[in-house]
Amino acid sequence: MEQGLLSETEPVVALVDIAGVRASAAALRSAFEELTGAPVLHAFAVKAAPLVPVLRLLDAEGIGAEVASPGELALALAAGVRPERIVLDSPAKTRAELAEALRRGIAVNADNFQELDRIDALAGTGTGSDTGTRSGTGTGSGTGRGTDSGPGSGFGPGSDPGPGRSRLGLRVNAQIGAGAIGALSTATATSKFGVALRDEGARERIVRACLDRPWLTRLHTHSGSQGLGLELMTQGVLAVYELAEEINAAAGRQQIDTVDIGGGLPVNFASDEETPTFADYARALRDAVPGLFDGRYGLVTEFGRSLLAKHGTVLARVEYTKTTGARPIAVTHAGVQVATRTVYDPAAWPLRIAAYDAKGAPKAGDAVVQDVAGPACFAGDLLAEARELPLLEPGDVVAALDTGAYYFSSHYAYNSLARPGVHGFRADAAGVRFTTVRAPQTVEQIVAESGGDRPDALL
Ligand SMILES: *Cc1c(COP(=O)(O)O)cnc(C)c1O
């Protein structure tokens, strides 16, 4: 408040705690370093915080990038993440996206058998595999391409792990069931992601698809985000490890040399405590799947929320207050545009709210049950409903805590509300220093991005 970051023209801002991000990255690295001597690539799930300076900060901390769209890939490259430290996962990769990833040497996890066929075809038409042995006997997927166009050994880490050579994997749905949040559970019996492992005949077909493609050296699984217990997560990894062992036995060599265990470590949104920790999860994995840590398998991780959530905060001014039906309501500038999931699904995504006075000091006063509303024009736009807080007044400030992942970085453009500015901060003896990560969106930009450059288009 002293430095005027929050103002009449910027009544909502987002903050990133730089030291906190570094600490989480270090905790992730050390949790796995302690358990395996094999190579581990930690790839941050870019969708959790698609901000170039954040990706660069993580890259500086040894964390690569997991991307799932051309936009996310462009952000990772703009942040300077090296292609060999990027993993492309997406259930809907176009041929052009695949070709681009292979050209750049970005790791790709194919989502399904049809995608494997596309990779076969791309490789067969000059993606750098003219030395390949035409080893396929067909994947049974019906297109016929798999039978004669295997890309050979050109992609594999066994042949040449140098840059420009994509590591290729297959995403598997271990079908272990749902966690607490259905929409974010990716390992259900009918999930849209990956190749189902427990469907009739699926296991044999996966093994066959791998044997037909010597360059397929990774298996990938990601069982869901938030709401999954460690138990369920480790079960998913165990299922994929067992599949890797089966494939390697059938191949008579260590064809699958890397298991990508995805992300999904849940975040505690109820207090400042960071539980479970990366170390908790790593130990649970080692206990449940010891063979994964005996040095034979490289690992890829794809954590998002657990790296960033605790290190972001949204601050918003209280513009007006009122009492309606005996309920005090504070109308603030933070709502659905920065906290979309919380507003639409408050039971699954409750956020802690902290109250401050106009000078930024913790707000004093008895707790009063009140609503903290956002600025959008629909009744459900509430950051918190019936929450006990000191009675808010105009000019006060509310903070939505633990919003570093999937909140302000995933702006929702409802009501043409502007994307707020994002500022990193460092605190030391000299005070608090802010640096802008993303400038606030201007109304001119909103107009330009809304067809403002072609007003006559429909006349
Ligand atoms: C979303 C996603 C992640 C990250 O999940 P978190 O819960 O943020 O850790 C990792 N991998 C894949 C494939 C994802 O879709």
Image (spheres, helix red, strand yellow):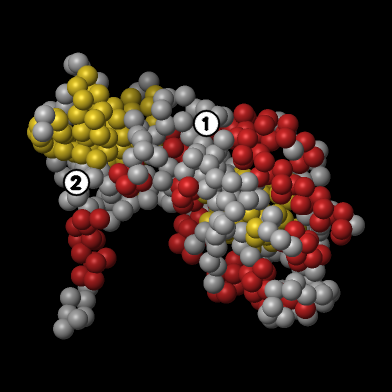
Q: Is residue 36 left or right of residue 5?
A: right
Contact between marks 1 and 2 (CB within 8 A): the answer is no
Find residue 59 and report its horizontal and vertical position in percent.
54, 46
The residue at the point 28 percent across, 56 percent down is 413
Q: The N terminus lies in which quarter of the figure?
A: top left
Q: Is residue 20 above or below residue 107?
A: above
Q: Nearer the viewer, residue 303 or 197?
A: 197
Q: Quadrant of residue 329?
A: top left
The residue at the point 46 percent across, 50 percent down is 183
Find residue 334 and report its horizontal and vertical position in percent.
24, 41
Q: Quadrant of residue 136?
A: bottom right
Q: Nearer the viewer, mark 1 or mark 2?
A: 2
Q: Nearer the viewer, residue 333 or 33?
A: 333
Q: Residues within 10 Å of mark 1 (few under 14, many from 20)?
A: some
Q: Which mark is residue 379?
A: 2
Is tag 1's residue or tag 2's residue first in the polypeptide sequence? 1
Asked whether residue 1 appears in the rendered view, the answer is no
Separation (CA) of disc 1 from disc 2: 39 Å
Q: Nearer the viewer, residue 280 or 180?
A: 180
Q: Is residue 157 left or right of residue 192?
A: right
Q: Residues within 10 Å of mark 2 (few under 14, many from 20)?
A: few
Q: Secondary structure at mark 2?
A: loop
Q: Secondary structure at mark 1?
A: helix
Q: Is residue 223 left or right of residue 373?
A: right
Find residue 276 and report its horizontal and vertical position in percent.
55, 29
Q: Is residue 266 above or below residue 220?
A: above
Asked whether residue 204 appears in the rendered view, the answer is yes
Q: Which mark is residue 23?
A: 1
The residue at the point 72 percent across, 81 percent down is 144
